[in-house]
Image (cartoon, rainbow, N blue to C red):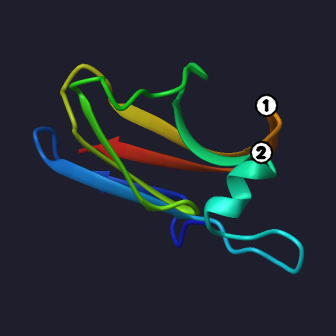
Amino acid sequence: SSSSSQTEISAGSSVSLSCQLYSYTGVYCDDSGRSQGIDLLWVNQAGVKLKISDSRYQISAPGHCIITLTTTLLNENDNREWICEVTQGYQVKTSATYTVKIS
């Protein structure tokens, strides 16, 4: 979840968004989660999965159940939206949407 539904930031600034999955009994937040098909990923406002190879973004995942997206905001969009999705077996189980408004 995010503490604020919308954040204002100036164009040219860098923004980092972190998403963490807290597990309950029977779902493990480590490599064993992969065997259960649980994964975290970032998608853009068009619903396209962001790839680590995309030079516009830095995506790091220090642990299986945490993923961080870092990018520099450009003037081309007034508002940008990124979605952290928790998937299991290619099905989205839950998601958190982050909206950044460029001031």
Q: Secondary structure at mark 2?
A: loop
In the foreground, 62 or 2: 62
Q: Position of residue 26 (x, y in %)?
A: 89, 73
User: Answer yes or no: do the residues labelled 1 and 2 have beta carbons within 8 Å?
Assistant: yes
The quadrant where residue 78 appears: top left
In the foreground, 76 or 33: 33
Write down the residue under mark 1.
Answer: 90
Q: Secondary structure at mark 1?
A: loop
Q: Position of residue 17 (x, y in %)?
A: 39, 56
Q: Residue at coordinates 25% horizontally, 52% vertically from top-left? A: 15
What type is the residue that disc 2 sits on? Gly
Q: Position of residue 74 (x, y in %)?
A: 19, 29
- Disc tally is 2
Q: Residue 79, which numbered label? A: none
In the foreground, 39 or 55: 39
**Label 1 neighbourhood size at 10 Å, few (<14), some (14-19), many (20+)?**
few
Image depth: mark 1 or mark 2 in front: 2
What type is the residue that disc 1 sits on? Tyr
Residue farthest to the left, as pictured: 12
Q: Is residue 39 left or right of residue 12?
A: right
Write down the residue under mark 2.
Answer: 37
